């Protein structure tokens, strides 16, 4: 019998290696990123090094915040990297070309240079950029639907795409900031509004995740379209607010804060939903020996999960602690698998094929951290 690969079991694939599609997505995104930077940083660009540093500086904190939301059921790293790369490469390059074409061919000739720039920012850019960022989320819905188990997953993937886009976009803004305004530009984009793109694309992510959990036979177009329209509206409101001075910016900020609070409520409710699934579905496996009532109690709280791992690490070492982490994630995946089956999204044969490796992993992991 081949050795059990926890990463492969948790990913639901024969191997833990990234899929061909994921590798191609990352490769194409990398090429697009290079081309986009080459076009952006054309002759006359100055202070490129400082621009890159300023654009990347907030990234670790923002990434840490997003990944902190992903502790209950962590997403595959390869999918997160592909989402980030798509935003930084493919979405940036195509958006840059389409926005420029819209300005040169439509808004500029129609409204003149100044009003044309404003129309591009308020009308064209929100539509183009949110559609392009959302495209990779639709790809997840089409090819890796099982990764989308609720709104939390949609928010995480949407935010990762948006962070990739925002970092590259900010490099351009900082490089071509008028003399003496670099500090102000960084304050506005890097400190005052670093969550603009993540907030917008997170709305698309929620729509895509809702579509992934639609019961069999129901259309998935409506939730995706609803999330995308929300993202476009929020993005357009922010870009258009500059025409109304401080009052416009204040209104845009209030709306943004409202969206942020709403996302926090959605995340909290989704976490409670997952805990409810664990308490509902895992007790039926007590007879197999892979779950006990104390295990269900531990699995029902992020704090207790962390405490359990810390205790095992301090008393038994890193290996058993890693096994406990695998056990926790496998148990969560099993609970969500039951929900997908209840919604008619997983046939019985597929359910068994996914359930049995998870139970086997839980058995091996439990033996490792309890012996």
Image (cartoon, helix red, strand yellow):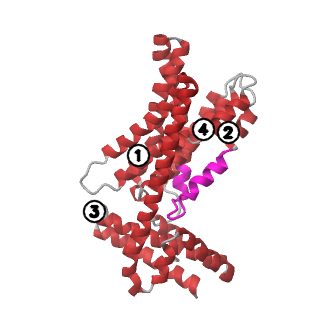
Categorize mark 4 by other alpha carbons within 10 Å: few (<14), some (14-19), many (20+): some
Q: Which residue is mark 2?
A: 55
The span from disc 2 to disc 4 (Cα, nearest Å) is 13 Å
Residue bounds of the magenta highlight? 58-82
Mark closer to the observer (1, 4): 4
Name the secondary structure under disc 3.
loop
Residue on which the image places disc 3? 344
How far apart are labels 3 and 1 at the CA level? 21 Å
Q: Residue furthest left?
A: 217
Q: Which mark is residue 138?
A: 1
Write down the quadrant of residue 369 in the picture.
bottom right
Tag count: 4
Residue toward you, 280 or 47: 280
Mark 3: give few (<14), some (14-19) or many (20+) Cα within 10 Å.
some
Relative to the observer, which residue lies in front, 346 or 176?
A: 176
Q: CA distance from mark 2 to mark 3?
A: 44 Å
Which badge, 1 or 2, is on the more N-terminal residue? 2
Q: Residue at x 44, y 41 (%)?
A: 135
Q: Quadrant of the C terminus?
A: bottom right
Q: What residue does disc 4 label?
A: 193
In percent of width and height, residue 206 lies at 42, 49
Q: Are marks 1 and 4 in contact (CB under 8 Å)?
A: no
């Amino acid at each position: 019998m081949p050795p059990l690969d926890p990463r492969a079991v948790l990913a639901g694939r024969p191997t833990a290696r990234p899929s061909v599609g994921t590798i191609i997505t990352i490769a194409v995104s990398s090429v697009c990123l290079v081309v986009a930077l080459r076009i952006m940083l054309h002759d006359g660009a100055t202070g490129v090094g400082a621009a890159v540093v300023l654009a990347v500086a907030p990234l670790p904190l923002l990434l840490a915040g997003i990944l902190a939301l992903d502790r209950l059921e962590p997403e595959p790293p390869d999918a997160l990297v592909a989402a980030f790369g798509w935003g930084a490469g493919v979405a940036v390059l195509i958006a840059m070309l389409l926005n420029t074409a819209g300005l040169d061919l439509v808004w500029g000739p129609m409204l003149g240079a100044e009003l044309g720039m404003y129309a591009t920012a308020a009308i064209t850019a929100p539509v183009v950029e949110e559609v392009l960022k959302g495209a990779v989320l639709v790809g997840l819905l089409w090819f890796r639907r099982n990764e989308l188990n609720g709104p939390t997953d949609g928010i995480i993937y949407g935010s990762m795409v948006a962070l990739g886009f925002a970092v590259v976009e900010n490099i351009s803004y900082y490089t071509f900031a008028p003399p003496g305004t670099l500090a102000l530009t960084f304050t506005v984009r890097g400190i005052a509004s670093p969550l603009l793109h993540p907030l917008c694309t997170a709305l698309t992510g929620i729509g895509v995740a809702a579509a992934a959990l639609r019961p069999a036979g129901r259309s998935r177009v409506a939730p995706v379209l609803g999330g995308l329209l929300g993202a476009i509206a929020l993005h357009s409101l922010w870009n258009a607010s500059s025409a109304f001075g401080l009052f416009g910016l204040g209104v845009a900020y209030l709306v943004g804060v409202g969206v942020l609070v709403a996302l926090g409520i959605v995340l909290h409710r989704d976490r409670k939903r997952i805990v409810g699934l664990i308490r509902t579905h895992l007790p039926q496996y007590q007879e197999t020996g892979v779950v006990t009532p104390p295990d269900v109690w531990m699995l029902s709280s992020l704090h207790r999960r962390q405490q359990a791992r810390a205790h095992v690490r301090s008393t038994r070492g890193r290996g058993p602690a890693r096994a406990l982490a695998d056990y926790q994630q496998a148990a969560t995946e099993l609970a969500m698998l039951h929900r997908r089956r209840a919604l008619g999204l997983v046939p019985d044969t597929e359910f068994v094929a996914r359930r049995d490796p998870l139970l086997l992993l839980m058995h091996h992991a439990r033996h490792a951290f309890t012996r």
